[in-house]
Image (cartoon, rainbow, N blue to C red):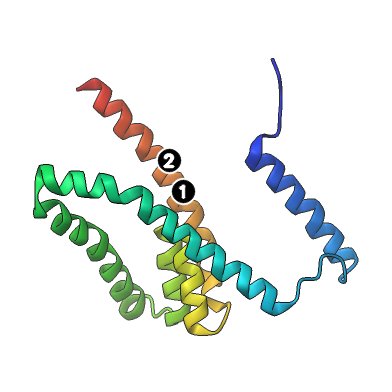
């Protein structure tokens, strides 16, 4: 039985090692700020473009089969939880708006949204609220994904 790191395991191990080397020798792996901004922005835009290109045929086919109600219910299912989360976080829990938007990006497990929020805020503060909700969102997404597949097989 072959044992390997896998792509994500290798990336994690490389990140840990390079992060350690950077902590010990701060000049190691230094990237100029403008180059880092270009890579982040370019990567985000290419990611969004590829997702849109890949999703378009399925979206159009779904609209043809089900009609505009698919789009409308999708908009409600996407927007309503985020609107409620922002209202709850602002009025009940009194979160700072930057951290609150970071939490919302984490709950949706959307790294691209975090990048956009940080760019508009001109700060890395939204990342403070991103980590824990992202981890919980990934676990819930994985668990409920399996549950839905099991339910679909049972039907």
Left or right: where does residue 126 sit relative to residue 104? right
Label drawn at residue 142: 2
Across and down, in percent, residue 47 comes to: 48, 58
Q: Which residue is mark 1?
A: 138
Q: Residues within 10 Å of mark 1 (few under 14, many from 20)?
A: some
Left or right: where does residue 71 sit relative to residue 39? left
The quadrant of the rendering that contains the N terminus is top right
SS at mark 1?
A: helix
Across and down, in percent, residue 44 comes to: 51, 64
Cβ–Cβ under 8 Å for marks 2 and 1: yes
SS at mark 2?
A: helix
Left or right: where does residue 71 sit relative to residue 53? left
Across and down, in percent, residue 85 comes to: 31, 68
The quadrant of the rendering that contains the C terminus is top left
Q: Name the residue at 15% across, 51% down.
A: 70
Q: Name the residue at 20% across, 61% down.
A: 75
């Amino acid at each position: 039985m072959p044992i390997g790191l896998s792509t994500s395991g290798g990336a994690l191990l490389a990140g840990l090692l390079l992060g350690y080397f950077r902590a010990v020798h701060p000049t190691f792996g230094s990237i100029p700020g403008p180059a880092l901004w270009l890579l982040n922005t370019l990567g985000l835009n290419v990611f969004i473009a590829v997702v849109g290109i890949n999703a378009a045929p399925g979206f159009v086919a779904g609209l043809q089969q089900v009609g505009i109600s698919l789009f409308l219910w999708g908009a409600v299912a996407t927007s309503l939880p985020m609107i409620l989360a922002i209202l709850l976080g602002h009025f009940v829990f009194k979160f700072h708006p930057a951290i609150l938007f970071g939490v919302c990006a984490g709950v949706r497990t959307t790294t691209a949204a975090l990048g956009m929020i940080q760019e508009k805020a001109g700060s890395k503060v939204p990342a403070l609220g991103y980590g824990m909700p992202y981890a919980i969102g990934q676990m819930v997404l994985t668990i409920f994904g399996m549950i839905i597949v099991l339910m679909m097989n049972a039907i």
